[in-house]
Image (cartoon, coloured by chain):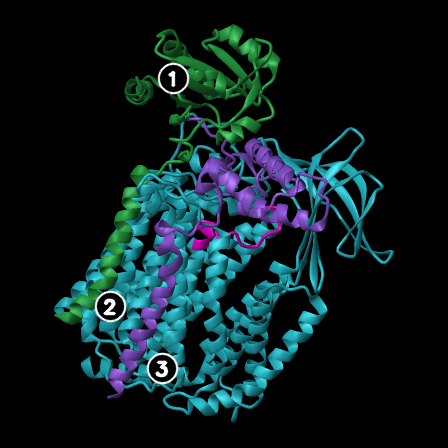
Chain colours: A cyan, B green, C purple
Amino acid sequence: MLPGIGQFLLVLSLLLAAALTVLPMLGYARNSQTLMQTARPLAHVLFITVMASFVVLVVLFVQQDFSVLYVAENSSLELPLRYRITAAWGAHEGSILMWVTVQALWISAVAKFSQSLSLSQISRVLSVLGLIALGFVAFVLFASNPFETIFPVPADGRDLNPLLQDFGMIMHPPLLYFGYVGLSVAFALSVAALIGGEINEQWIRWSRRWTNIAWAFLTMGIILGSWWAYYELGWGGWWFWDPVENASFLPWLAGTALIHVQAVSERKNAFRGWTVLLAIIAFSLCILGTFLVRSGSITSVHSFAADPFRGIFILVLLAIYSGGALTLYAFRANQLRSRDTINLNSRETLLLANSLIFITATFTVLLGTLFPMIFEAVGKKISVGAPYFGLMFFVLMIPMAVILPLGSQLRWHRDDMLAAVKQLLPYFIASTLLTVVVWLIFKPLNIRAIAGIYGGFWVLTATLGQWFKRPGRATAGFIGMSVAHVGVAVFLIAMSMTEHKDIEQDILMSPGITKQVGGYDFTFTGVDRVKQENYQAQQGHVEVRRDGRLITTLNPQKRFYPKQQMPMTEAAIYVGWSKDIYVSLGEAVNQEGAWAVRIYIKPMIRWMWFGGILMLTGAIIGLFSARIKRQEDKQRDHVMAQQLKLS
Amino acid sequence: MKKIVITLIPLAIFVGLLTLLFLNMGYHNETVPSPLIGKPVPAFELPQLYEKGTLTEQDFLGEPWLLNVWGSWCPNCLYEHPVVTDLAQSGQLKVVGLNWKDEFENADAWLKRLGNPYDTILVDYKGNVAIDFGVYGAPESFLIDANGIIVHKIVGELTPDNVQNEILPKLAQLK
Amino acid sequence: MRLFFIIISLITSGHVNAIEVYDFKNEQQRELYQELTEELRCLVCQNQNLADSDADLAKDLKDQVAEFVINGQDKDTILAYMVQRYGDFVTYNPPLNPSTFFLWFSPFMVLLLGAVILIYNIRKKQK
């Protein structure tokens, strides 16, 4: 009964999405107010039906309805309630339904918070978003239906993958979807603008907010993913440049470029085509990433079960959305001619240079991810991994860090380049001194670590200096920018320390033995057994002391989930201000109770993620820009006045 | 016109990308090609499963042979066993086994149960020689010519199909 | 291919730490070993390096790497040994040769070309 309702709601959503695609666009083409006015109500109803189907899925999990294949495969009688709820988006089918739900939520939000757009604009935007929803609802219904039933009904389910029984993994996908889907708004705006052959300031200003929110979600999703991989996979790393990680990083890089260019194009009628193109690229990369993760065409440690039909389906969606948008771009972009000039010695130039660096980084990550495919086409195999990406990013981020303070030093419109450089001189000296001090304390440091730290101090001192020397009150835009840039600095310094000053030791420990690693004494006191709801574990005990003083006792586990016959390592981590101490348990080596133990000491790793959080905080603060708000109010009044006149 | 050409560039790149992704879905597989094709057999000195004394790569010079890597723990070696047997019994070439990462008792029981198709069985329980051959799973088979040059490698089980279309034609060329 | 691969995928078999303990002569050796096992790919896994993998083959290869390191071989020799047997696929650091020029240099071409176009565009508009 209930699965049937879920299915029905999805079919209804499909029809509503189709209506949302067709009716407002038809209205725009025929200049029919009535048809265009269907856009907003349709958007809200679509959200209700999609959301309802998602709720049905959650209820099926809560009720343990194993007649539904997806529930039977991802839940079990022993699974605690909290994981039964989150299992709803734990595997492929449910996670795509969640994507669609988030998409519908955004469409509804766009319909609500778009008073400053004219009816002709919003109907086009919502129609494009409707088309995107249509494709993904169809994907759920025809290629990954979570409401598929089985007969006979199994007595118990196969249980949720233990890796997903964890807070980080529960939050990571929804956050990423909010990011991906958020970028679809800028995409829809671009397409709508290309269809109409016009784009103006307040349109860009409007979409800039959506981009900022999307970018903030994307950043949070990536941070959580990295954090999760760090503590859950027991390998002590935080980024592997795996294709699936790259899949989420690509839209982030393009989104970063987009945010900076939007700052230019909302002020000036220049580089509008570039803004539009970046928005198309950013969202296209979201779909491309989904393809890479779910088609099985790339070898990744995180991939979902591969299914060629799903792969083809997403590829077709990609062809329609991105191919369509880029075709429109090819023939219409020239109508978005820029009228304003840009001075070479201005903040605008530097922001554009930033977008160029980030789009090059996007290109590099994409190239590295897909290059093995090119090799495979001629029957050869190659691996492209961390050594390649690490080196390329090191080289590409040097100009980024160098010009960042210059960009925020230069004034809009026109400035004196030489004077700006002179004003940066104190920061240059300060950061040089700080880098030397750090080097003296932590030497030896290799060239990359020094460069990273130097870059970090350069951005940090300049950002702080510019903050204190600013004329007048700080606007939300300025605060947001400063916070985000401090985040960049914190990330650079912390990442350099974590990557180059970490300690890793694999050692054999017998009970009672003490070993020294990185200035800490680790005493192994043995292993005992623990039993939890749905797993058993062997739990080791390691006391950590510094100069005889007990700092913490770490209890790493080796778990076994009987339902899935799956072993798991659970690292134990001591979180300190300046470093993490990380212990994970290997195998029992002999009968006397000796175990192989891996110990990591990771300096500043938390600060790295904190840097990311600062970046996204900056993006959110930027939303409250009074200047944008003032102009939006003006525009809304203008739109309303026009509507009054029409009626 | 010139302007359209410029704005067409992103679309062109995208179409190329799409084509790559689409084609890759067809040809993507997990097999790692061997860099040893056309190169001499790596030097080895290995004991045998049933005979005394060790053998080296020199002992196999003079006629083409097939080195079949297997283990009693390997499910797909079971699938290919009849094919290996047929090939060995056809007398077209010498089939040599490399018993990899196994234990004598298990290997012996496996052969007693299914029959022993091999002319000779070399033993590599530590796995060092297998690394020299670039073995990364079982079963794998190497076709080696009379001069000790590796001519072809099959990753995964031998099947009537790949014996007919790969091994035998390559063998015919050698003669 | 059916069940041929000893696939160590997250989906089917969980994630277990593979911790091997070797007696290195000094700190440099330990670091070299860590560097190598991070750079070398576990061939039968779904995209993991040797250091993270608990596959049987990965263990054999780690043993081999450790043996070479303890015997005092340098990084290039050990990498060459692996590449000779398993091909370029075994290292995450792609070699620099004509077939990979595009991989290594095209990003800089993109950056350079982009910079030229950007400056040209700005200049053109100023006039």
Mark pair 3, 2: CA separation: 19 Å
Tell me the number on the disc at residue A484: none
Inspect the image, locate mark 2, and give the three-letter code of the amino acid beneath it: Ala
Q: Residue A514 at what x, y percent from top left?
A: 83, 46
Inspect the image, locate mark 1, and give the three-letter code of the amino acid beneath it: Pro
Q: Chain of mark 1?
A: B
Mark pair 2, 1: CA separation: 68 Å
Few, some or many C-alpha atoms within 10 Å of disc 2 (few <14, some 14-19, many ≥20)?
many
Location of residue A396 (image quadrant): bottom left
Q: Residue A466 at what x, y percent from top left?
A: 54, 86
Q: Is residue A469 above or below residue A39?
A: below
Residue at the image point whose x is 55% and y is 85% from the top = A467
* Mark 1 in CB contact with mark 3 (< 8 angstroms): no
Q: Which residue is mark 1?
A: B64
Element at label 2: helix
Mark pair 1, 3: CA separation: 81 Å
Element at label 3: helix
Depth check, front residue: A98 or A618: A618
Q: Is residue C66 above or below residue A222?
A: above
Q: Is residue B171 above or below residue A593?
A: above
Secondary structure of the magenta portion, mostly?
loop
Few, some or many C-alpha atoms within 10 Å of disc 3 (few <14, some 14-19, many ≥20)?
many
Q: Which residue is mark 3?
A: A632
- Horizontal side of residue A631 vs A220, given as left or right: left
Q: Residue A507 at what x, y percent from top left?
A: 73, 43
Q: Which residue is mark 2?
A: A192
Inspect the image, locate mark 3, and give the three-letter code of the amino acid beneath it: Glu
* Mark 2 in CB contact with mark 1 (< 8 angstroms): no
Q: Chain of mark 3?
A: A
User: Magenta segment range?
Assistant: A233-246
- Horizontal side of residue A633 vs B10, given as left or right: right
